[in-house]
Image (spheres, coloured by chain):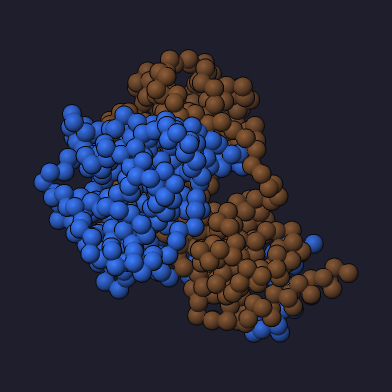
Amino acid sequence: MTALCLVETEDGGLADASARALTITRDLGTDLAAVVFADGIAQALAPALADYGVSRLYIAAGIDGYAPQAYARVLAELSKLTGATAVVAAGTEHGNEVLAHLGAITGLPMAANCVAVKPASDGPLTVTRQRWAGLLLEDAVLDAPVALLTAATDAVAPVPAAGPAELQASEVRQDVSAADLVVRARESAVGGGGQSLATARVVVGGGRGVGSADGFVPLEELASLLGGVVGVSRVVTSEGWRPHTMQVGQTGTKITPDLYLACGISGAIQHFAGCSGAKHIIAINTDPSAPMMTRADYAVVGDLHEVVPALVEALRTRGS
Amino acid sequence: MDILVCVKRVPTVGGVITLTADRQAIDTKASGFTISPHEECAVEEAVRLVERFGGSVTVVSLGPVAAEEQLRACLALGASAAVLIETPDGGETGPIATAAALASVAAPFDLVLLGNEASDTGDYQVGIRLAHLLGRPAVTGIKAVTVADDGSSLAASRTYQGVLETFTLPLPCVVTVKEGINLPRYPSLPGRLRAKRAAITRVPPDSVPSGQGPSGQGPTASDLRMTSLRVPDASQKQAAVLGHGVSAVPALVSVLEEIGVTR
């Protein structure tokens, strides 16, 4: 029995989300085969994949650029060829998109953003998957000849296999139709630059309590002193005080900083879906019973318009 | 340009999620209902496109009769027609059946917009399954749409791993969008009044395809069945109060030093 795992690359190496997907896939207890579409650097991934227990690497060649339906077509054929009992991808935009195409092509159900899988010796697979961006978990039975799954990107830590696998690599060239290639990404650089919210080590958050667009100036000063960036709650983008690209939450960005300093944010549950990956949370709020204040590690009861400038001043003095 | 926007009635959740005793659903006794922020943006995007190119915006929802409330909210934002596809007993349908039901009304439209994922079930697949049933191209997670002047194609883009990805799709097509593609307007008073009086087309549950078997996408034997829901174990930690107002600043600085984020 074989499980096929669609593997993505990031900065020339194995993407973190894919390492997590491989970790979950190992729980299926089958041989582990990886499929990589980046033919230029696929060979370089081989040692990392072997560490994660991959014994077979298929390098899909001949598709230029990300084309989700064509990727799914290749996975469908490889799945038949290898007699796979599961096809897994990371729960990224690409992973969920490709597996949804595979679900439509094969007619099979797909379980998105799984955090655990449990095979049964004589029966269908049991899965636990995220709903509400992880605020709720669903236990479910996935009854299908081939299990289509994506692995949540933030729930399972990436763990290499007990020992490296003996890995064999081979190239596959699957003919895909013109219709499968209609949707294909053209890549270009994103304007703006600067530190990304998703990967910043420090995020200073601002919510309704900030009160206005101008109110963010002290928060930006604080963020810059701490080498971080400013993130905002949904009300801030709805009010037009800051753009949506700065939004932390279920429908914004999921952050994983060492410190999230939440100022004037009450803490709707959708906001926690975005910031629960922070190692430490400090909340500043006038209302000590706000959910953000009770769920933080540290709380300061007070008006952010007084506390933040005083903190900026203290950090400046300390530095000089 | 005739646009169909698919929306879903979901519970409004605030500070906590409470489950029903049988753990089959969210307890909605004390909460209201809404549509997801992604879908609000899908409606706004459709209204803007029709303001520019002419045509119509139809909203469709699959769910209980009570979902008329969400459809009327979309009409107040500028949609011109609404369709409610009733589910058996007003219950939840899985993604395969949902796509099949939506496909039964989506064929006449030039563009079908959906939210990237429903905020409650988060299945991430209905739009793509719908596109396959219609034989149309699809792309998901879109944060910007530009329709060509002649209306024959659109460019859709999103950022992935720090890179801008742009897709060109011929119309008709299916696009799922994310919050941030636009800033939705507030409903106008005339809009709200019009929405209150508007007729909503109802499709009864017995005429809805199941999505299973040769006509739909799924072999009847395959299924993803929910057993139950649970709230993940939240850490029972209690926040340490560092102090009140500016007098807390020295303690705050010490904590920042301890975490190692001061320079």
**Is B6 rendered above or below residue A48?**
below
Can you tell which chain is drawn blue? B
**Is A182 rendered above or below residue A26?**
above
Q: In which quadrant of the rendered image does the C terminus of chain B lie? A: bottom right
- In the picture as drawn, the residue positioned furthest to the left comes out as B206
The residue lying toward the viewer, choosing from A216 and A283, is A216
Please give the name of the residue rendered at 50% of the width and 50% of the height, measured from the top-left corner.
B181
x, y (%) of residue B83?
23, 51
The residue lying toward the viewer, choosing from A120 and B134, is B134
**Is B53 rendered above or below residue B7?**
above
Q: In screen coordinates, is B224 left or right of A271?
A: left
x, y (%) of residue A272?
49, 63
Q: In screen coordinates, is B242 left or right of B102?
A: right
x, y (%) of residue A174?
44, 16
Q: In which quadrant of the rendered image does the N terminus of chain B lie? A: top left
- Residue B1 seen in this snapshot: yes
Count up the numbered dots. 0
- Residue B230 seen in this snapshot: no
The residue lying toward the viewer, choosing from A34 and B51, is B51
x, y (%) of residue B81?
27, 52
Please give the name of the residue rendered at 42% of the width and 32% of the height, measured from the top-left corner.
B152
- In the picture as drawn, the residue positioned furthest to the right comes out as A320
Please give the name of the residue rendered at 32% of the width and 32% of the height, measured from the top-left corner.
B132
Please give the name of the residue rendered at 52% of the width and 18% of the height, measured from the top-left corner.
A61
Query: Which hue belongs to chain A?
Result: brown
